[in-house]
Image (spheres, rainbow, N blue to C red):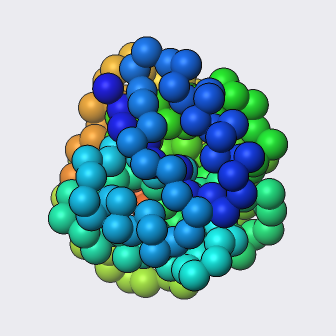
Amino acid sequence: MIRVAIADDLDMIRAGFELIIENESDMSVVASVGDGRAIIEACRTRHVDVVLMDIRMPELDGLTATERIMTQEDPPRVVILTTFGLDEYVSAAIVAGASGFLLKDASATSLLDAIRAVAAGDVAIAPSLVRTVVQQARNSPRVREVPGIDELTERELEVLQHLAAGRSNAEIAEQLYLSEATVKTHLSRVLAKLGVRDRVQAVIAAFAAGIADATDVP
């Protein structure tokens, strides 16, 4: 059972999310609050797997709340939800430690898929925002050394380069003539060796290390 907490200052938004989530057999809502301070407390006192976090809330905004939740022991995954698709929000959400970023006009199916994805340790980013994430990673400051890069095997480097180009597991599998299961295994090893939480952080590391092809952006 995926335990979901909702943080949004609009009662109708929270009620709508609750209705969608509680209709699923594999997830339930364990907290529904209207501000950033309340969601931090909810995550501290309850077992939460995934937080649906609004960006603009009274008392404490969603990005700051996400940063503070990430300092807790065994923090939940956070999916940022907003009516805004501005680039700075995407970048700030990633830096804060979010594992997902969706617009509030996303379909119920997209929302549920995002919850399941981040609960499983993956990343969920609205398709319309994927290019923004890759472009921001491409424009991030370059450094000569990224911890763990030298430990990657040749195949793991290839997988990381394709990931940095914005390709899905299925597309990487097709390009490298591998099964999706094998790609997932390689990606798990890449994340572990780089010491990063998710695919987005791995992409940022690839560009920072200068091993990604900056021209190969979808």
Residue at 43 percent across and 83 percent down: it is: 143
Q: Is residue 138 left or right of residue 195?
A: right
The image quadrant of residue 179 is: top left
Residue at 62% of width from left, 27% of height from top? 20
Against 168, is 173 above or below?
Answer: above
Q: In this view, does 192 lie above or below 67?
A: above
Across and down, in percent, residue 107 comes to 75, 31
Residue placed most toward the observer, 132 or 84: 84
Nearer-the-camera pick, 212 or 60: 60
Q: Does residue 218 appear anywhere in the picture?
A: no
Q: Is residue 64 visible?
A: yes
Percent from the top left, x then y, of residue 210? 48, 70
User: In the image, is residue 198 above or below residue 207?
Assistant: above
Q: Where residue 12 appears, x then y in whole percent?
A: 74, 46
* Left or right side of 174 for 155: left
In front: 209, or 53? 53
Residue nearest the observer in this picture, 30 or 146 = 30
Residue at x-position 62% and y-position 29%:
19
Quarter of the figure that contains the N terminus: top left
Q: Quadrant of residue 70?
A: bottom left
**Residue 188 falls in which quadrant of the image?**
top left
Residue 158, percent from left and from top: 42, 44
Who's the residue at 39% across and 68% down the image?
40
> What number of labels is visible?
0
